[in-house]
Image (cartoon, rainbow, N blue to C red):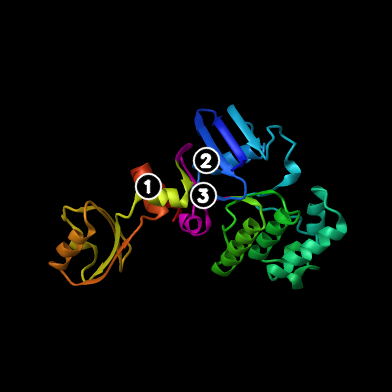
């Protein structure tokens, strides 16, 4: 499969701080590729280098078959983490303006704008000024401005940030529709649950280093099925000092337990101590895998953004 984006040995520093270190990455054409990791891990720096907003200190970046800084610009749509729209423009005028910047004619832009406004339930707002919109509406308008020209590569930096659950679901469906239509979609997020639900590939970065990269199937196969979801009458205390327990994530009513050896041994041991209300063998989540790979520092970082 050809690569929509290829990074070879890419490093970027800011003074004494290394934001991205010797990064090798290939984003297959047509994939939905999640860039995940806590805030400050290097996701946005990587995206800005792909977009040629920042230049790497060393290494090579290829986007849609080109290494030049301008060759692929009109074929890429970008939603930055820092949102910003012309507040005194009407919604329809703003969308046609952004489309014109990528070479789309006015009639085509109006047709695509109307299609997206209907899809995102914003048709009644097409003649309103941007400063009359709520934060969630404004974010959806900026998303439409990003994708209106049907770019081959779409890069979304924290697209779900600040959205309520209803609009998160609207955005999720829209991203899946873009992939189904043939676009390559990269999106960054510190919410690993969202990435796990919709991505077919995941790149995980921590403190500038790539710590995981592959398809969800490859990741699941590598990390196996050594996790148990458990609920008892006495909570996490029953798991103390059991030799087959490697790690416990206490979720309140439930505990997620990483088991050494046969999970059935854990079931037998806990059953001797208390009533077991729920016992389920499952695969570790991306969040759990991240903690395993990056260690105690990752746990602290993840807690800060949870």
Q: Which residue is mark 1?
A: 222
**Residue that carries the numbered disc 2 in the rendered image:** 42
Q: Is residue 1 left or right of residue 125?
A: left
Query: What is the span of residues highlighted in magenta in the rendered image?
Result: 187-211
At mark 1, the secondary structure is helix
Alpha-carbon neighbours of circle 1 within 10 Å: few (<14), some, or many (≥20)?
few
Q: Is residue 281 visible?
A: yes
Label 2 vs 1, first from the N-terminus: 2
Quarter of the image for the C terminus: give it.
bottom left
Q: What residue appears at the point 46 percent right and 53 percent down from the top-left corner?
A: 305
> Pointer 3: residues within 10 angstroms few (<14), some, or many (20+)?
many
Q: Earlier in the sequence, mark 3 or mark 2?
A: 2
Residue name at image x 21 percent, y 69 percent = 234
Residue 201: give its label: 3
Query: Marks 2 and 1, how far apart in space?
Result: 24 Å
Q: Is residue 159 above or below residue 5?
A: below
Q: Position of residue 218 (x, y in %)?
A: 43, 48
Q: Quadrant of residue 129?
A: bottom right
- Nearer to us of marks 2 and 1 is 1
Identity of the residue furthest to the left in this view: 272
**Which image quadrant for residue 93?**
bottom right
CA gap between label 3 and label 2 equals 18 Å
The quadrant in which the N terminus is found is top right
């Amino acid at each position: 499969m050809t690569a929509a984006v290829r990074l070879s040995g890419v490093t970027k520093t800011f003074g004494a701080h290394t934001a991205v270190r010797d990064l090798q990455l290939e984003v297959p054409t047509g994939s939905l590729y999640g860039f995940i990791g806590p805030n400050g891990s290097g996701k946005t720096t990587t995206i800005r280098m792909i977009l040629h907003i920042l230049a790497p200190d060393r290494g090579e970046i290829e986007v849609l078959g080109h290494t030049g800084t301008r060759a692929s610009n009109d074929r890429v749509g970008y939603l930055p983490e820092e949102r910003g729209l012309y507040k005194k423009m009407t919604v329809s005028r703003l969308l046609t303006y952004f489309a014109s910047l990528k070479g789309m004619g006015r009639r085509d832009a109006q047709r695509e704008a109307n299609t997206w406004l209907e899809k995102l339930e914003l048709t009644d707002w097409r003649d309103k000024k941007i400063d009359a919109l709520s934060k969630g509406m404004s974010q959806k308008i900026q998303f439409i401005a990003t994708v209106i020209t049907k770019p081959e590569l779409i890069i979304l930096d924290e697209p779900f940030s600040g959205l309520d659950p209803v609009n998160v679901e609207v955005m999720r469906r829209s991203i899946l529709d873009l992939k189904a239509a043939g676009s390559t979609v990269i999106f960054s997020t510190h919410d690993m649950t969202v990435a796990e639900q919709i991505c077919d590939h995941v790149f995980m970065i921590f403190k500038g280093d790539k710590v995981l990269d592959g398809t969800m199937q490859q990741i699941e196969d590598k990390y196996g099925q050594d996790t148990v979801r458990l609920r008892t009458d006495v909570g996490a205390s029953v798991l103390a000092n059991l030799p087959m327990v490697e790690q416990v994530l206490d979720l309140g009513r439930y505990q997620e337990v990483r088991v050494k050896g046969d999970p059935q041994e854990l079931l037998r041991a806990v059953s001797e101590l208390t009533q077991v209300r729920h016992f389920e063998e499952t695969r570790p989540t991306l969040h759990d895998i991240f903690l395993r790979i990056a260690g105690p520092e990752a746990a602290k970082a993840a807690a800060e953004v949870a």
